[in-house]
Image (tube, grey):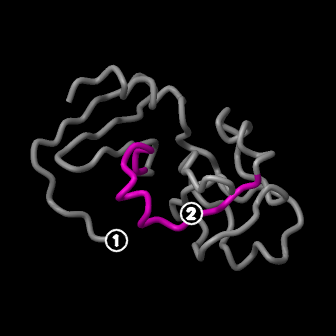
Amino acid sequence: MEIPKIKNLKIYELDEGARIIIGEGITALKIGQNYLPFLTDLKILEKFPSVTVDMGAVKFMCNGANVMRPGVKSFTEFEKDQIVCIVEESQKKILAVGRALVSSKELPEMAKGQVVENMHYISDMYWEIKKSIKD
């Protein structure tokens, strides 16, 4: 994915070593070596692969749990370590963003195990900090 030049870029350093990056038309999160689209940035989120989870998984995703294979209803194609959106099945809303722990090619053969590491979810500390930033 090509990243365009961004004007008026602001970087907010957080205590945990994470960063919130805000520029014209984009908000992103850097956690460790991973750059994640912020959950409010729907135009960018739609460009990423996704995993759709059943409604029973929603409360766990919104509390930071990783995506487990039994909760996965459908998915698009992705590679291990790629950034993936986590979508709930009824309204198709993006609940979280994370890093794929396996390739989508492995999912049909999997009955259990972790699929996506949940790195940023609705109402997490990054979400709450971003609400207090005046951009």
Q: Decide: marks 1, 2 in contact (CB < 8 A)?
A: no
User: 119 or 132, which lies in front?
Assistant: 132
Residue 19's x, y, as percent?
A: 35, 35
Of all residues, the one furthest to the right in this rendering is: 111
First in sequence: mark 1 vs mark 2: 1
User: What residue appears at the point 43 percent right and 50 percent down from the top-left corner?
Assistant: 36
Residue picked out by circle 1: 1
Report the span colored magenta: 36-54
Of all residues, the one furthest to the left in this rendering is: 7
Q: Is residue 101 above or below residue 36?
A: below
How far apart in space, not on screen, are marks 1 and 2 (Cα)? Answer: 15 Å
Image quadrant containing the C terminus: top left
User: 85 or 42, which lies in front?
Assistant: 42
User: 90 or 120, which lies in front?
Assistant: 90
Q: Amino acid at mark 2?
A: Asp
Residue picked out by circle 2: 81
Q: Quadrant of residue 134?
A: top left
* Element type where label 1 sits in the image: loop
Residue 41's x, y, as percent?
A: 36, 49
Magenta residue check for 44: yes
User: 32 or 114, which lies in front?
Assistant: 114
User: What residue appears at the point 39 percent right and 53 percent down from the top-left corner?
Assistant: 42
Residue 132's x, y, as percent?
A: 33, 20
Q: Nearer the viewer, mark 1 or mark 2?
A: 1
Residue 123's x, y, as percent?
A: 53, 29
Q: Amino acid at mark 1?
A: Met
* Element type where label 2 sits in the image: loop
